[in-house]
Amino acid sequence: MKRIVVKSSKKYTIIIDKGILSETYERIQPVLKGSIVYIVTDDIVDSLYGSVLADSFKNSGIHAYKYVIPNGEISKNSDNYISILNDMANKGISRSDTLIAFGGGVPGDLGGFAAATYQRGISLIQIPTTLLAAVDSSVGGKTAIDLKEGKNLAGAFYQPDMVICDLSLMNTLPDIVFKDGCAEVIKYGILSGNPLFEQIRKPIKKNIESIVYRCIKIKRDLVQKDEKDTGIRQLLNLGHTVAHAIELLSGYTISHGAAVAKGLHLVTKISYTQGICPKEVFTQINDILNIYGFNTDSLYSAKDIANAIIMDKKRSNEYINLILIEDIGKCAIKKTNMADLDSMIQKAMDYRG
């Protein structure tokens, strides 16, 4: 078992282990205050592991309620958000009770936002069930829902009280869902450099505990320095500005991980064609995306991507901060004029190296 402590506006522990879902009550008991837990999950996770989580509260004196959403990004919407709040109110959830966000990024973000705003904030436990959620979305306190105009446009920074990361839950992930998480792991490898970048050249599953631990530590360190994402934490957006635009343009039919891979590829090409990173770095990143079998075609025009980026929540007036790559292990936040974005993307797309 590995533990990571996050010291932000709220101090909390991340537990990384295998086979601990059935011990959830025992693990979270030190941070429980009320007598009710409210579980937000999706239908696939519920069918596989819902009874295991619920059974952990038997004979504990804790009453467990559950709200189940359909799997997929399409469920991270305002209708489900309001329905959850109404259901919590109808069931008498109080400020001393706890919401458990149980699943991948969608239940994590949606449940987290509900916890952040119900009665001005109740306790939150994150239990990620995907690689993507484990290394990224369950840690750091970003919670949100999507609007029709763009991804994560309504949300709040709200740190959990604990994160329980049971790596054995990933054994049942479809290959395509596990692959989504690999895109986030590659992002961390580019940001941090070696030894992580070299480690992920080999199959992730063989060293998953070590890799998840390294990724979370990288995020923990950035969150502790910049919890509200106004400075250095923005490095974690590497590839994501383009990725969110691609997701929006696809109507969320392209998964987050697949879009991140496309975003990493395009940002690497932008970095190279703008003279920021050398050719060998472009080649290294392109190679590792190919090792994992990602389709890096952007699918959309430079103009469409640039127009979609206008709705990105990180935009400030006519500027947006792009995370560009100088080297493996060295990325930079570049203030970019939106008027220049179309031509920058087009120049990168035109490069065929």
Image (cartoon, rainbow, N blue to C red):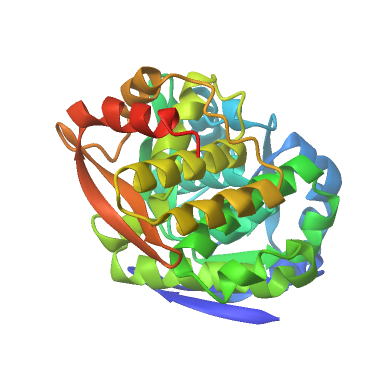
Q: Nearer the viewer, residue 254 or 161?
A: 254
The residue positioned 49% from the left and 66% from the top of the image is: 161
Q: Nearer the viewer, residue 353 or 71?
A: 353
Horizontal side of 187 relative to 290 (left or right) equals left
Residue 152 lies in quadrant: top left
Horizontal side of 324 relative to 78 (left or right) equals left
User: How many numbered callouts?
Assistant: 0
Residue 142 percent coordinates (x, y): 42, 51
Whether residue 308 appears in this view of the structure is yes
In this view, the residue farthest toward the left is 317
Q: Nearer the viewer, residue 69 or 166?
A: 166
The residue positioned 75% from the left and 40% from the top of the image is: 176
Residue 55 lies in quadrant: bottom right
Q: Nearer the viewer, residue 311 or 288?
A: 288
- Quarter of the image containing the N terminus? bottom right
Horizontal side of 105 relative to 317 (left or right) equals right
**On screen, residue 160 above or below 65:** below
Residue 77 percent coordinates (x, y): 50, 27
Whether residue 32 appears in this view of the structure is no
The residue positioned 44% from the left and 60% from the top of the image is: 140
Residue 235 lies in quadrant: bottom left
Residue 116 percent coordinates (x, y): 41, 48
Residue 4 percent coordinates (x, y): 54, 78
